[in-house]
């Protein structure tokens, strides 16, 4: 069960991160236009953008174990520096949620082929 049935594809992971990065920016803009009622959605999209921005440029995407280690390191951080968000605690909670989602995807080596905007 520990060995994945398909080989790790670092290029696919980077492509997925880039697509999610772009989708998160669009989601932020949409939430920003909706105003006060969408502040949580804005922070959630900002968190996803932050996670994707940090991970898409990392060399660790080439190897599954290194990528998992990098995600684990990020989860262990106390704070995630960002500007323009509405609620720091909510933003940090969403960042950790996205990192946990990515950790599960990395461990199972599944989900990176889904590159559509809405997932």
Image (cartoon, rainbow, N blue to C red):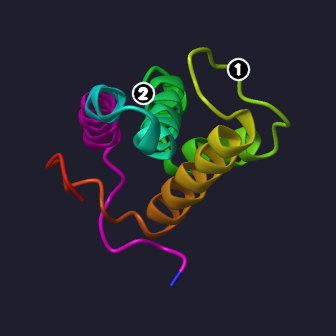
The answer to which of marks 2 and 1 sits earlier in the sequence is: 2
Residue 5 sits above or below residue 47 on the image: below
Task: Give the extent of the magenta segment.
Answer: 2-27
Q: Is the residue 82 above or below the residue 9 in the image?
A: above
Q: Up-down: is 100 above or below 23?
A: below
Disc number for residue 2: none
- Quickly name the residue at label 1: 81
- Residue at position x 63%, y 19% from top? 82
Could you say whether the residue bearing mark 1 is in a helix, strand or loop? Answer: loop
Q: Is 69 located above or below residue 28 in the figure? A: below
Q: Which residue is mark 2?
A: 56
Q: What residue is rendered at 49% in x and 43% in y?
A: 44
The local secondary structure at tag 2 comes to helix
- Which residue is situated farthest in the left direction here? 116
| Magenta stretch prevailing secondary structure | helix
- Mark 1 crowd level (few <14, some 14–19, many ≥20, 10 Å Cα): few
How many numbered discs? 2
> Where residue 5 sits: x, y (%)?
33, 74
Residue shown at 29%/66% (left/top)? Answer: 6
- Residue 112: image quadrant is bottom left
The foreground one among 105 and 118 is 118
Q: CA distance from mark 2 to mark 1?
A: 17 Å
Q: Horizontal and vertical percent for residue 56?
A: 42, 27
Between circles 2 and 1, the one closer to the viewer is 1
Is residue 5 magenta-colored?
yes
């Amino acid at each position: 069960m520990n060995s994945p049935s398909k080989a790790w594809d670092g290029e696919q992971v980077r492509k997925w991160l880039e697509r999610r990065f772009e989708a998160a920016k669009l989601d932020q803009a949409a939430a920003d236009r909706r105003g006060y009622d969408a502040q949580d959605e804005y922070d959630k999209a900002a968190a996803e953008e932050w996670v994707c921005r940090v991970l898409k440029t990392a060399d660790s995407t080439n190897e599954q174990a290194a990528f998992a280690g990098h995600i684990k390191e990020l989860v262990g951080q106390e704070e995630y520096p960002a500007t323009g968000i509405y609620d720091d605690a909510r933003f940090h909670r969403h960042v950790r949620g996205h990192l946990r989602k990515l950790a599960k995807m990395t461990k199972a080596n599944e989900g990176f082929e889904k590159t559509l905007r809405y997932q």
